[in-house]
Image (cartoon, rainbow, N blue to C red):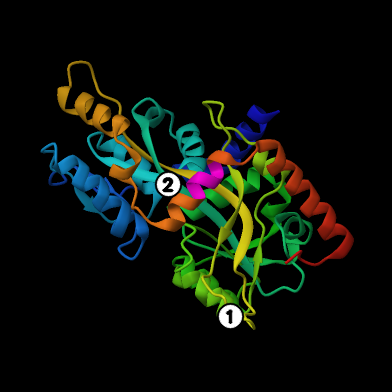
Amino acid sequence: MRNMNFLKSAIVAAAVFSGIMPSVSLAQEGPKIMTGSSSGVYFGTFGPKTEELLSNRKYKHTVAESAGAGENYLNVCQNPRNVGMGQADVLPGLAAANPDCAEKVQVVNTIGAECIFGVTNVADLINIDQVSDISFNLTIAVPPTGSGARLTWQNLVGLVPNLVDATIIDAKNAADAVDLVKKGEADMAMFVSFPDPENATFAAANEAELTFVDMSNEAILQQTLPDGSFTYDALEVTVANTGLKFWKGANAVNTACTKTVLFTGKPMEGDRFQTTLVKLLTEAKPEELQPQVGWLQSVMNTAANTSRDKMIEAAKAAKEFAAENGVALN
């Protein structure tokens, strides 16, 4: 059943995944580390960590902007000496839609964890099952084609089929998606982000008194990747650092989180450059690839020490509670 769920979500996403065009050509100047927008954490934090690691071994990779995980994957497929980063949940769909790339690209390390966030202005809409129930009446703002968030949305549609009935509008990025909800042009924003409590997008949602939606349920938590590992963990993550007595916003929310991974081209026989690059990235220690910040270490530790059965039971309990009460626990 798990494999069928994966196959179904991959098929649903195939048209979107295969329509992404990488922006860095084969005539690029030197190998790149494909990240995301210049304002994002991939570009500003994780990319430089990878660049530093490679530079210490005399590799000349430089950080490059991109539209996100989808573009990164196809770019590495075309330029196998490049390095890319993205969410683990989107790679199977990209591989299924681009079988030639599946033979050329390999994951080499885990560098973090990202979570799926939904925020809404609809009263008592607190989890993804409720979103599914009334999806035909909802307009949802999602970052654009090529972004990791859009690919994650396509994966969720394969796991929660009624989501396909929602009206999707393009947002420039996560901040813009939230802004569209604040302005009343969308009922909900969906985006993928690192669970950094200092994130300005979280602050904007809280200041507008929007409700955070739990984006995990049993079907989502039971999906597996081709290697047999689970695609998502259900975690409680902090979205605001505040001890204010009359704080109206959310301090912590429950949602689904997936690994952030590095990938590069599979080496051809006799290619010492690429063979050594793969070995270097595969054997890199967490502190060499991850920023040493509290929020990242917290979410990585929580994911490693949370029982899978407890995650699924918690998702079931949340669904039952919402059905009976229609309100959030916190």
Taking the image as shown, residue 290 lies to the left or right of residue 15, namely left
Give me the disc on residue 112. Answer: 2
Query: Horizontal and vertical percent for residue 308?
Result: 66, 37
Q: Secondary structure at mark 2?
A: strand
The residue identified by callout 1 is 244
Kindly report the distance in space between the C-alpha atoms of the residues bearing marks 1 and 2.
30 Å
Q: Residue furthest right?
A: 324
**Residue type of the residue flagged with mark 2:** Gly
Q: Count residues near mark 2 (Cα–Cα under 10 Å), then give few for <14, some for 14-19, many for 20+.
A: many
Give me the disc on residue 299. Answer: none
Vertical side of 67 occupied by 206: above or below: below
**Which residue is located at x 36 percent, y 59 percent?**
41
Q: Residue furthest top?
A: 269
Q: Quadrant of the N terminus?
A: top right
Taking the image as shown, residue 116 lies to the left or right of residue 79, namely right
Tell me if I can see residue 25 in this picture: no
Q: Nearer the viewer, residue 294 or 219?
A: 294
**Residue type of the residue flagged with mark 1:** Leu
Magenta-drawn stretch contains 9: no
Q: Earlier in the sequence, mark 1 or mark 2?
A: 2
Query: Horizontal and vertical percent for residue 279?
Result: 26, 27
**Which residue is located at x 21 percent, y 47 percent?**
51
Q: Which residues are magenta?
A: 299-303
Taking the image as shown, residue 263 lies to the left or right of residue 267, namely right
